[in-house]
């Protein structure tokens, strides 16, 4: 019976996950900069630990106009999953939290639906602010933390910085069209 239930729910679950992914991508790669489906034009690269990273590529006229991929941080409530959109010059197009278990009213301020804190990263890149300022203010960086919740923003800032460093290391592969 369980096997049958799994088979019946697998497709709707996959469909829902795909819908959620598409909705997240629209928030971090503006629809006006591409004419393709970034999910269909995705590539897979390896991160520093050898883990597969799916890179969703937005294109127009056979040129990559933006990429998006998941980045992760360790928050107060566990793993924080974010989707990070980056333009070909390495500037943040957008970031959204896709999954977390942060404390309601404190750490959940990373949700765009709750506050606009996450939009402060739009337009930034490694170098602006300087790399050593990609930290929360409490740690000597540029980014605000939340009153009573430093761990969550620290994890998010670190994840975004790591994502930008990953882009810098793999830019040629991400932007290459075959």
Image: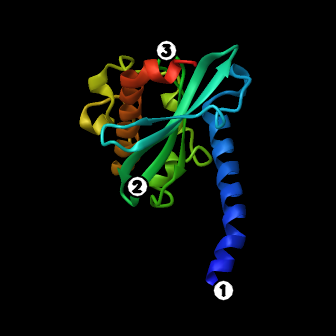
Rendered-image quadrant of the C terminus: top right
First of labels 3, 1 by sequence position: 1
Task: Say if 2 sits above or below 7 in the image.
Answer: below
Q: Mark 3 points at which residue?
A: 89
Q: Which of 21 and 175 is in front in this view?
A: 175
Alpha carbon separation for disc pair 1 and 2: 33 Å
**How many other residues sit within 10 Å of disc 1, few (<14), some (14-19) or many (≥20)?**
few
**How many other residues sit within 10 Å of disc 3, few (<14), some (14-19) or many (≥20)?**
few
Q: Position of residue 74 (x, y in %)?
A: 35, 52
Q: Position of residue 134 (x, y in %)?
A: 33, 29
Label 2: which secondary element: strand
Task: Say if 2 sits above or below 174 in the image.
Answer: below
Rendered-image quadrant of the N terminus: bottom right
Q: Nearer the viewer, residue 49 or 95?
A: 49
* Residue lying at the far bottom of the rendered structure: 1
Judged by depth in the image, the label closer to the viewer, 1 or 2, is 1
Give the left or right position of residue 102, taking residue 115 as reference.
Answer: left
Q: Mark 2 points at which residue?
A: 79
**How many other residues sit within 10 Å of disc 2, few (<14), some (14-19) or many (≥20)?**
some
Label 1: which secondary element: loop
Q: Position of residue 172 (x, y in %)?
A: 44, 18
Q: Name the residue under label 1.
A: 1
Where residue 14 sits, quadrant-wise, is: bottom right
């Amino acid at each position: 019976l369980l096997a049958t239930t799994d088979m019946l729910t697998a497709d709707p679950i996959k469909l829902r996950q795909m819908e959620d992914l598409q909705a997240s991508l629209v928030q971090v790669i503006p629809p006006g900069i591409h004419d393709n489906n970034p999910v269909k034009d995705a590539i897979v690269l390896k991160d520093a630990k050898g883990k597969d990273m799916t890179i969703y590529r937005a294109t127009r006229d056979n040129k990559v106009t933006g990429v998006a991929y998941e980045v992760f941080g360790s928050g107060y409530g566990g793993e924080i999953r974010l989707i990070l959109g980056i333009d070909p010059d390495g500037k943040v197009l957008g970031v959204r939290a896709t999954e977390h278990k942060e404390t309601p009213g404190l750490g959940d301020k990373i949700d765009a639906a709750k506050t606009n804190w996450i939009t402060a990263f739009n337009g930034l890149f490694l170098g602006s602010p300087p790399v050593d300022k990609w930290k929360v203010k409490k740690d000597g960086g540029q980014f605000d933390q939340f009153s009573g919740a430093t761990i969550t923003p620290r994890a998010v800032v670190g994840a975004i910085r790591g994502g930008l460093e990953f882009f810098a290391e793999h830019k040629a592969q991400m932007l290459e069209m075959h």
